[in-house]
Image (cartoon, helix red, strand yellow):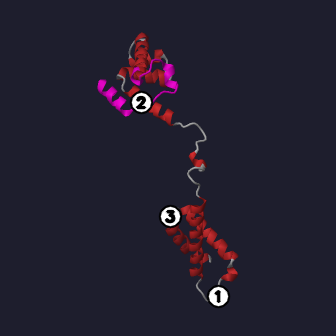
Amino acid sequence: MIDLIPALRAFARTICHVPDDADDLVQETLTKALANLEKFEPGTRLKSWLFTIMRNTHYTRLKAAAREAPGLLDCASSRPISQPSQDWSVQSREVHQAIQNLPSHQREVLMLIGVLGVSYEETAEICGCAVGTIKSRLNRARAGVLELLGERSSQALIERRPQLSDSHWDAESARH
């Protein structure tokens, strides 16, 4: 039997396609063969006997899987266990797109201060301008993002709201 394991694995991989499932099938085949060794008829081919066990085991698994598949109405996998994160994902892309539509000097300041947490003074040094200019650019960047998102306040960014369509972004890009 041990000498036939490579042939069993090759046959299992042709009918299973998933290597782990194929290995499980080989293991189950060998377990069944050892448990039923008294049923093997001497003088017949052991390889054929093992392949028959494997083939029958595979088809039995397929039938059981089809029979045990959950129905659409009672399928637990179709019921969410937590709130969907798609809204946040879509909103994140919208904010990213709004930031990308800002003028580069405003986008740069918003990223340095708002995202990376760099101080006003350091940002002024990096950009080569006065701290007052940095504060002004940051204020205009924040207002620009809110406007591009169709919001009136920064609090609205973290509250639930209707999603903006792709056509909104196309119109905004064309406008700027």
Residue 64, quarter of picture: bottom right
**94 and 12: which is toward the camera:** 94
Q: Is residue 66 above or below residue 133?
A: below
Residue ID at (47%, 15%): 120
Whether residue 5 appears in this view of the structure is: no
Q: Residue furthest bottom?
A: 43
Q: Is residue 102 above or below residue 34?
A: above
Residue denoted by label 1: 42
Residue denoted by label 3: 17
| C-alpha span from label 3 to label 2 | 43 Å
Residue 168 image position (x, y, % from top left): 36, 29
Q: Is residue 157 magenta?
A: yes
**47 and 6: which is toward the camera:** 47
Q: Residue furthest left?
A: 174
Density class for disc 2 (Cα within 10 Å; few <14, some 14-19, many ≥20) is few
Q: Is residue 36 above or below residue 74?
A: below
What amino acid is labelled 3 in the image? His
- Disc 3 is placed on an element classified as loop
